[in-house]
Image: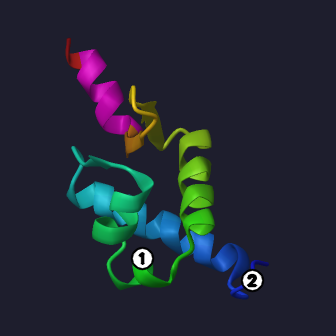
Amino acid sequence: MNAHGQGTYAIDSIERRVLDYLASHPHAADSAEGIRRWWLGSQGATATPEEIEQALARLVDGGLMRRVSLADGTRLYASEQEHSEHHVAH
């Protein structure tokens, strides 16, 4: 459990919100901060950066999202399904 007492519940909730967002916006890609600000709505204001990073890492590890590192070190997250469909189409 984290310092805010939310523990795994918060991370599970973040994962669900991210997947819901991707279901509505399958081409979306953003940084962890962008996901916090724009994808999570009011939950993003209360989620810690660590909770968001943990949720995103679990989604990447589970094959539901992909992470791309840019030259400046920024990490972008996007739907793995969109990436797979793109490669299949070409």
Residue at x 24%, y 24% (from the top left corner): 86
Q: Which residue is most to the bottom?
A: 5
In the displayed structure image, the side of residue 64 where residue 35 appears, left or right = left
Residue 69 locus on image (x, y percent): 44, 31
Asked whether 87 falls inside the magenta stretch, the response is yes
The vertical placement of 28 against 66, above or below, is below
Q: CA distance from mark 1 to mark 2?
A: 17 Å
What span is in magenta?
80-88
The local secondary structure at tag 1 comes to: helix
The image quadrant that residue 11 belongs to is bottom right
Coordinates of residue 31 in the picture (x, y in percent)? 38, 50
The residue pinned by badge 1 equals 44
The numbered mark, 1 or 2, whose residue comes first in the sequence reads 2
User: Is 18 placed left or right of 26 in the picture?
Assistant: right
Quarter of the C terminus within the rendering: top left
Q: Is residue 48 above or below residue 78?
A: below
Left or right of 62? Residue 40 is left
At label 1, counting other C-alpha atoms closer than 10 Å, the crowd grade (few under 14, some 14-19, many 20 or more) is some
Question: Which residue carries the number 2 mark?
Answer: 3
